[in-house]
C-alpha cells in the first residue's frame, strides 16, 4: 500500500511538471518566431553611445566603480558637469557580460534582451498560476504579454533592457515574497530581498515593489491580518531603500531626476490623460512607434476631458466589483507601477508616453487579464479561445512587423518615425543617415526641420554644419556653429563642435584658426582619432612637420588601425623627404583598404622616389592630407 502511494505521488508530480513545461515551450517558440528579425538587427539610437562606443563595458571594474556610475554618462569628462538623474548601476554589468560573450555584436546584445524577456514571461506565468490557479487562463495571459507589440521597444532596443531587468527582478521579488509570507520561509524572504535590491539597481521602477506588497496584503493574502508582522517584513527592504537613496544622492546629486517640472497641479490634472493613453496602447495597439508626446495645449482639450471621464468610469466600475480582490489588485498594481512616469514626480524624458515604460505595469495588468480569460472560458470556452487565438495572431504579426520595420536598424527607424509619423525628434537622425549616403538635398531638408522643431539641440546644428562644409559652404557652416556655441553639449559634442569649426576655417584657408579649433577639439574629446588626424594634417599644411608627426603618432596610439592617420603620417614623411618611413607606414595598411583610399598610388610614388633618389615628388589632390 505504501509503495503504491509513492508511485501515485511521483505520477502526480510528473503531470504537474509537464503542465508547466509544455506551456513554457510553446511560449518560447512563439517569442522566437515573432522576434526573429532582431537576430539580424543593429545598434540604434542610444545603443551607439551607451553600448557600441562605451569603452567602460569592455572590462570588468570593482563593485564600487559600478555603484558610483550615473547612467547615461559614458565620458569621464562629463562626470559632474551635468546630471541625467538616472541611477542604474546593474546595466553596465550586463553589458560587460554581453561583451565577453558576444563581442561588440548588436545581434548578440539583442539576443540577451530576448533571453531576459523569455525569463520574464516564464516567471510571470508561474506567478499568475499562483494567483489565479488556472493554467489555461494564465497561459493565454502570458502569451498576450510575451507577443504584445507594446513590448517590442523594451526587447528590441538594447538600451531599453533596464525595463526588462527591473520587471524580471520585481516579479521575482514579488514571487518569493508570496512564498515567504505563505510558508513563513526565511529563505524565500531572503531571495525576495535580494531580487528587490536587483530591481532598484536596474531602474527606478523597482521602488514600486513595496506598494505592491502592501496591496497584496490588503487584497490577496489569506493570512490573518497582523500589522506588526507585516511592518517587520518590510524592514529589510526599507534598509536597502535607505542605502540606495544615500548612494544615489551621492552619485546624481539629487534624490529624484533633476528636471524643471512646472506646476504640480497641472501635472496631476493631466495624469488621467497619460494613464488612459497607456491603457489604450495595451488594449488597442495600433500605430505604435517611438512617441514624442507633450501635454495638450489647454485644460479644456477634449482628449484630456474624455480621459478624465473614462478614468472616473473605470474607477466606478472597479468600485462596483470591489469584492473581486484579484481584479482590484491588478488595477491598483498597474497604477502603482506606472506612477513613476506619470510626470507627477520629476522625469527627464522628452516624451510623456513611451511603450517601454509599460513593460512592468503590463505584467500586473496580466493578473486581471488572466481572471477575465478564466471567467470567459467558464461561460463560453470555444468563443473565448477563438478570440484569444485571433488576438495572438494579430499581436504576433504586428510585433514581427515592428521588429523588422521599426526597431531593426536606424535607417528603417528614422524613415518610419519621421516620414510616416512626422516625429521630428528624429529628423536630425534621418538627415545624418542621408548625409552618410551623400544625398545632400534630402539631408539638408531634414536638418532644417530638426533645427526648426528642436532649436536647443546642439547636435543638429553641429551635424548640419558638417553637411555645409562637405558641400563647400564653410561660411554658412560657421554661422550655424556660432548659433550652437551657447547650447548645452556633452564633452563629445563640444569636441565635435570645435572639430567642425576647425574644418570650416580650414576650407576657408584660415589654417591658424583651424589649428586652434582642432587643438580644443582634442582637449574635449581626446579619444576621437579623426580629431588627431585633422590636427596633424593642419600642422602639415603649415609646414610644421615635427608637430605633425608627433600628433599623428599620438593618434595612432589611440587607434592603430586608422587609415586617415596613417595616410596623413605618410604624406608628412614624404614632404620631409623620408620615403623609407613613409613606405613603412603605408605598408602596414591592409591590402583590401589600399585601393579604396588611394594608398597604393601613394605607396608606388614613395617607392619610386626612394629607388631613384628623387629630392621630392608631386603630391596630388588625391594624395593630400585631408582633415
Image (cartoon, rainbow, N blue to C red):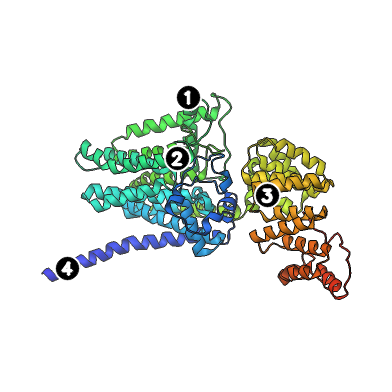
Location of the N terminus (image quadrant): bottom left
Q: Which mark is residue 455?
A: none
* Relative vertical location of residue 604 with respect to residue 71 in this rendering, above or below: below
* Relative vertical location of residue 180 with respect to residue 245 in this rendering, above or below: below
Q: CA distance from mark 4 to mark 3?
A: 75 Å
Q: Residue furthest bottom?
A: 611
Q: Which mark is residue 522?
A: 3
Q: Give the number of the mark in front: 4 or 1.
A: 1
> Are discs 3 and 1 less than 8 Å apart at CB?
no
Q: Please, what secondary structure does the residue beneath circle 4 have?
A: helix
Residue with the mark numbered 2? 250
Q: Give the number of the mark in front: 4 or 3.
A: 3
Q: Earlier in the sequence, mark 4 or mark 1?
A: 4
> Are discs 1 and 2 less than 8 Å apart at CB?
no
> Are discs 4 and 2 less than 8 Å apart at CB?
no
Q: Which mark is residue 265?
A: 1
Q: Please, what secondary structure does the residue beneath circle 3 have?
A: helix
What residue is at 54 percent from the left and 24 percent from the top?
299
The image quadrant of residue 549 is bottom right
Q: Position of residue 153 (x, y in %)?
A: 52, 49
Q: Earlier in the sequence, mark 4 or mark 2?
A: 4
Amino acid at each position: 500500500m505504501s509503495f503504491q502511494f509513492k508511485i501515485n505521488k511521483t505520477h502526480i508530480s510528473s503531470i504537474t511538471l509537464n503542465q508547466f513545461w509544455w506551456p513554457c515551450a510553446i511560449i518560447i517558440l512563439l517569442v522566437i518566431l515573432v522576434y526573429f528579425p532582431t537576430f539580424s538587427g543593429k545598434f540604434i539610437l542610444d545603443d551607439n553611445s551607451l553600448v557600441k562606443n562605451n569603452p567602460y563595458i569592455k572590462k570588468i571594474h570593482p563593485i564600487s566603480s559600478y555603484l558610483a556610475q550615473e547612467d547615461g554618462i559614458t565620458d569621464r569628462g562629463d562626470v559632474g558637469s551635468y546630471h541625467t538623474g538616472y541611477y542604474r548601476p546593474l546595466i553596465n554589468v550586463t553589458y560587460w557580460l554581453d561583451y565577453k560573450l558576444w563581442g561588440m555584436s548588436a545581434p548578440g546584445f539583442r539576443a540577451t534582451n530576448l533571453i531576459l524577456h523569455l525569463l520574464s514571461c516564464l516567471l510571470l506565468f508561474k506567478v499568475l498560476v499562483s494567483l489565479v490557479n488556472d493554467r489555461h487562463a494564465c497561459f493565454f495571459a502570458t502569451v498576450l504579454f510575451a507577443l504584445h507589440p507594446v513590448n517590442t521597444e523594451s526587447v528590441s532596443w538594447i538600451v531599453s533592457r533596464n525595463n526588462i531587468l527591473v520587471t524580471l527582478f520585481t516579479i521575482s521579488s514579488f514571487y518569493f515574497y508570496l512564498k515567504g509570507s505563505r510558508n513563513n520561509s526565511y529563505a524565500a524572504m531572503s531571495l525576495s530581498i535580494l531580487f528587490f535590491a536587483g530591481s532598484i539597481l536596474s531602474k527606478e521602477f523597482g521602488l514600486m515593489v513595496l506598494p505592491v506588497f502592501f496591496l497584496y496584503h490588503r487584497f490577496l493574502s489569506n493570512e490573518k491580518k497582523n500589522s506588526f508582522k507585516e511592518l517587520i517584513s518590510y524592514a529589510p527592504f526599507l534598509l536597502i531603500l535607505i542605502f540606495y537613496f544615500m548612494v544615489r544622492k551621492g552619485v546624481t546629486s539629487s534624490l529624484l531626476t533633476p528636471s524643471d517640472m512646472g506646476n504640480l497641479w497641472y501635472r496631476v490634472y493631466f495624469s488621467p490623460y497619460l494613464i488612459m493613453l497607456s491603457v489604450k496602447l495595451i488594449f488597442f495597439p495600433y500605430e505604435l512607434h517611438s512617441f514624442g508626446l507633450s501635454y495638450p495645449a489647454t485644460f479644456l482639450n477634449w482628449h484630456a476631458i474624455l480621459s478624465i471621464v473614462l478614468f472616473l468610469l473605470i474607477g466606478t466600475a472597479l468600485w462596483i466589483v470591489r469584492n473581486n480582490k484579484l481584479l482590484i489588485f491588478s488595477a491598483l498594481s498597474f497604477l502603482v507601477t506606472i506612477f513613476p512616469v506619470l510626470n507627477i514626480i520629476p522625469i527627464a524624458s522628452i516624451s510623456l508616453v513611451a511603450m517601454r515604460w509599460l513593460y512592468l505595469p503590463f505584467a500586473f495588468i496580466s493578473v486581471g487579464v488572466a481572471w477575465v480569460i478564466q471567467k470567459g472560458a467558464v461561460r463560453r470556452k470555444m468563443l473565448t479561445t477563438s478570440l484569444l487565438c485571433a488576438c495572438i495572431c494579430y499581436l504576433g504579426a504586428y510585433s514581427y512587423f515592428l521588429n523588422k520595420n521599426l526597431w531593426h536598424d536606424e535607417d528603417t527607424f528614422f524613415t518610419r518615425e519621421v516620414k510616416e509619423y512626422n516625429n521630428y525628434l528624429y529628423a536630425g537622425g534621418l538627415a545624418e543617415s542621408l548625409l552618410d549616403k551623400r544625398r545632400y538635398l534630402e539631408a539638408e531638408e531634414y536638418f532644417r526641420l530638426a533645427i526648426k522643431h528642436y532649436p536647443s539641440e546642439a547636435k543638429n546644428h553641429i551635424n548640419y554644419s558638417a553637411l555645409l562644409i562637405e558641400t563647400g559652404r564653410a561660411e554658412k557652416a560657421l554661422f550655424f556653429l556660432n548659433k550652437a556655441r551657447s547650447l548645452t553639449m556633452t564633452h563629445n559634442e563640444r569636441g565635435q563642435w570645435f572639430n567642425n569649426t576647425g574644418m570650416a576655417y580650414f576650407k576657408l584657408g584660415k589654417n591658424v584658426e583651424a589649428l586652434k579649433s582642432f587643438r580644443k577639439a582634442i582637449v574635449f574629446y581626446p579619444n576621437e582619432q579623426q580629431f588627431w588626424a585633422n590636427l596633424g594634417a593642419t600642422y602639415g599644411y603649415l609646414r610644421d612637420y615635427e608637430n605633425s608627426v608627433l600628433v599623428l603618432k599620438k593618434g595612432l596610439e589611440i587607434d592603430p588601425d586608422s587609415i586617415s592617420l596613417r595616410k596623413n603620417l605618410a604624406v608628412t614623411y614624404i614632404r620631409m623627404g623620408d620615403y623609407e618611413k613613409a613606405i613603412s607606414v603605408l605598408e602596414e595598411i591592409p591590402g583590401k583598404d589600399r585601393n579604396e583610399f588611394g594608398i597604393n598610388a601613394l605607396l608606388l610614388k614613395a617607392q619610386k622616389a626612394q629607388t631613384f633618389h628623387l629630392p621630392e615628388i608631386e603630391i596630388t589632390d588625391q594624395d593630400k592630407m585631408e582633415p
